[in-house]
Amino acid sequence: MNKKTRLLSALAQINNVTQLIKDNEWEHHLQQHLCVVEYELQRQLSLINENERGRFQVGSTKLFDAAKQQRSQLSDSAEAD
């Protein structure tokens, strides 16, 4: 199980606990603590998503640059003929 999957699973568990503590005498107190944990899990998940998006964009740029270079080489070789 990778980090992203674990974080998503943890967020689902926070949601489950939130449902389970409804009408609990200490619901407000418990909810305050759950909010802190949920916020941190979401923060970590957003960092992973940004990192994945950045890698995709860098990868796409590299592919675009490689394709551009190949086109230029093909043009050069066609002109030489």
Image: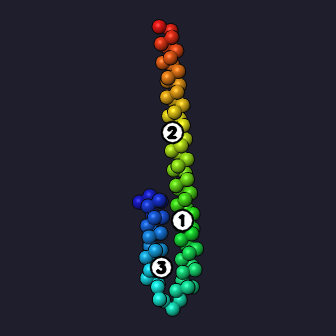
38 over 67 or under it: above or below: below
* SS category of the residue bearing label 2: helix
Residue drawn at point x = 57 percent, y = 69 percent: 39
Q: Amino acid at mark 3?
A: Thr
Q: Amino acid at mark 2?
A: Ser
Q: Residues within 10 Å of mark 3 (few under 14, many from 20)?
A: some
Residue drawn at point x = 53 percent, y = 89 percent: 26
> Would you identify the image quadrant in which residue 13 lies?
bottom left
The answer to whether mark 1 and mark 2 are in CB contact below 8 A is no
Q: Residue furthest top?
A: 81
5 over 67 or under it: above or below: below
Rendered image: mark on residue 10: none
Q: Residue furthest bottom?
A: 25
Place of residue 63 in the rendered image (x, y in percent of width and height, measured from the top left): 50, 34
Give the Cα separation between the discs numbered 1 and 2: 27 Å
Q: In the picture provided, is 70 more to the left or to the right than 1?
A: right
Figure quadrant of the N terminus? bottom left
75 over 1 or under it: above or below: above
Residue drawn at point x = 53 percent, y = 43 percent: 57
* SS category of the residue bearing label 3: helix
Q: Amino acid at mark 1?
A: Gln
Marked residue nearer the N-terminal end (1 or 3): 3
Give the Cα separation between the discs numbered 2 and 3: 41 Å
Rendered image: mark on residue 42: 1
58 over 67 or under it: above or below: below
* SS category of the residue bearing label 1: helix
Q: In the picture provided, is 28 more to the left or to the right than 20?
A: right
Place of residue 41 in the rendered image (x, y in percent of width and height, measured from the top left): 53, 66
Marked residue nearer the N-terminal end (2 or 3): 3
Determine which residue is flagged by label 3.
18
Determine which residue is flagged by label 2.
60
